[in-house]
Amino acid sequence: MEDYKYDIGELVYAAVDILNDGGMPGIDDEEGLIAPAGMRGMIIQFGRAEADETQHVYLVQFENGPEGVLGAPVGCLPEELTQEKLVAA
């Protein structure tokens, strides 16, 4: 088995602001904010980037709104995620 940092169903947080790279439908602004740093999400799948098979990619659903409903799946790199809850500075 490959050495992935996270597994399906694990709780993660956005380590940085997750911005649309132009490939996320439903986000009007190409650079629109998908998930701010600290937003909680769940890993729903993982794999490798098509363009660089050495790069792991995680499919994450972040909470969307105060009810905690999960939003659309978003592809994230390992360095964009953490399992440590971020504390406001």
Image (cartoon, helix red, strand yellow):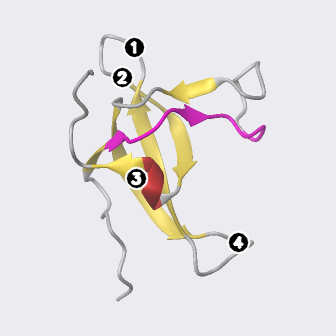
Q: Amino acid at mark 3?
A: Ile
- Viewer-proximal residue, 62 or 79? 79
Q: Amino acid at mark 2?
A: Val
| Label of residue 76 in the image | none
Residue extending farthest bottom: 1
Q: Amino acid at mark 4?
A: Glu
Circles 1 and 3 in contact, beta carbons < 8 Å: no
Q: Position of residue 74 (x, y in %)?
A: 55, 43
Name the side, left or right, on which 60 lies relative to 50: left
Q: Residue at x 21, y 36 (%)?
A: 85
Estimate the spatial distance between the alpha carbons at disc 3 and disc 4, rounded to whole Å. 18 Å
Estimate the spatial distance between the alpha carbons at disc 1 and disc 3, rounded to whole Å. 19 Å
- Tell me if mark 4 has few (under 14), some (14-19) or many (20+) residues whose alpha carbon lies within 10 angstroms of its own: few
Q: Main secondary structure of the magenta part?
A: loop
Vertical comparison of 16 with 53: above or below: above
Estimate the spatial distance between the alpha carbons at disc 2 and disc 3, rounded to whole Å. 14 Å
Q: Residue at x 67, y 34 (%)?
A: 20
Q: Which residue is mark 4?
A: 50
Q: Position of residue 33 (x, y in %)?
A: 59, 24
| Label of residue 44 in the image | 3
Query: Which of labels 3 and 4 is toward the front?
Result: 4
* SS at badge 1: loop
Circles 1 and 2 in contact, beta carbons < 8 Å: yes
| Label of residue 69 in the image | 2
Circles 2 and 3 in contact, beta carbons < 8 Å: no
Q: Which residue is mark 1?
A: 65
